[in-house]
């Protein structure tokens, strides 16, 4: 496993964790109004998505070859997309927590 592939996998897994935490923050927020669980999860999802997108962007920018050359280009693009989804879920959760609580 090359360094580019390793970093792209790390970035994609971090983004996936952000998506899961953001989804949980949205679903738990309805049942726990006032505890701050939704707000904390939303902030964690935002942070994980941002780091995932930054790492994915670095992998894509540093790749010297195309897909399948070992530079982690496809994984970098996956990390960018998953990080964007995590940011969207975190932003939605943060907006809901500010509006209601």
Image: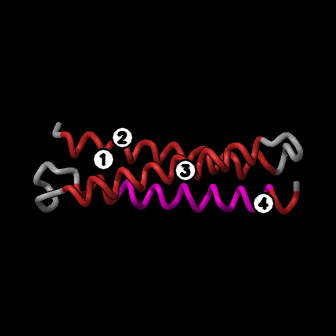
Prevailing secondary structure of the magenta residues: helix
**Residue designated by label 2:** 10
Q: What is the quadrant of residue 2 in the picture?
A: top left
Q: Image height check: is 19 above or below 35?
A: below
In the image, taking residue 24 as reference, residue 19 lies left or right, namely left
Which residue appears at 80% of the width and 55% of the height?
A: 97
In the image, taking residue 86 as reference, residue 82 lies left or right, namely left
Residue 91 is inside the magenta segment: yes
**Which residue is at the front of the view, 54 or 22?**
54
How many other residues sit within 10 Å of disc 4, few (<14), some (14-19) or many (≥20)? some
How many other residues sit within 10 Å of disc 1, few (<14), some (14-19) or many (≥20)? many
Which residue appears at 65% of the width and 60% of the height?
A: 91
Marks 2 and 1 close (CB-CB < 8 Å): yes
As measured in the structure, the alpha-carbon distance from the residue carrying label 1 to the one carrying label 4 is 31 Å
Residue 48 is inside the magenta segment: no
Residue lying at the far top in this picture: please name it. 1
Which residue appears at 17% of the width and 51% of the height?
A: 71
As measured in the structure, the alpha-carbon distance from the residue carrying label 2 to the one carrying label 1 is 5 Å
**Residue designated by label 3:** 19
Q: What stretch is highlighted in magenta?
A: 78-97
Position of residue 43 measured from the top left corner of the image (x, y, whole percent) = 65, 48
Q: What is the quadrant of residue 1 in the picture?
A: top left
Element carrying mark 3 = helix
**Residue designated by label 1:** 8
* Sequence-first disc among 1 and 3: 1
Position of residue 83 measured from the top left corner of the image (x, y, whole percent) = 47, 55
Tell us which disc is closer to us: 1 or 3: 1
Position of residue 33 measured from the top left corner of the image (x, y, whole percent) = 87, 47
In the image, taking residue 86 as reference, residue 52 lies left or right, namely left
As measured in the structure, the alpha-carbon distance from the residue carrying label 4 to the one carrying label 2 is 29 Å
Element carrying mark 4 = helix
């Amino acid at each position: 496993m090359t360094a580019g592939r390793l970093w792209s996998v790390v970035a994609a897994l971090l983004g996936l964790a952000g998506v899961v935490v953001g989804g949980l923050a949205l679903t738990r927020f309805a049942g726990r109004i006032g505890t701050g669980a939704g707000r904390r999860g939303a902030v964690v999802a935002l942070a994980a998505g941002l780091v995932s997108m930054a790492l994915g962007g670095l992998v894509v920018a540093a790749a010297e070859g195309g897909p399948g050359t070992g530079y982690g280009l496809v994984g970098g693009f996956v990390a960018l997309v998953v990080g964007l989804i995590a940011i969207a879920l975190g932003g939605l959760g943060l907006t809901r927590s500010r509006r209601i609580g």
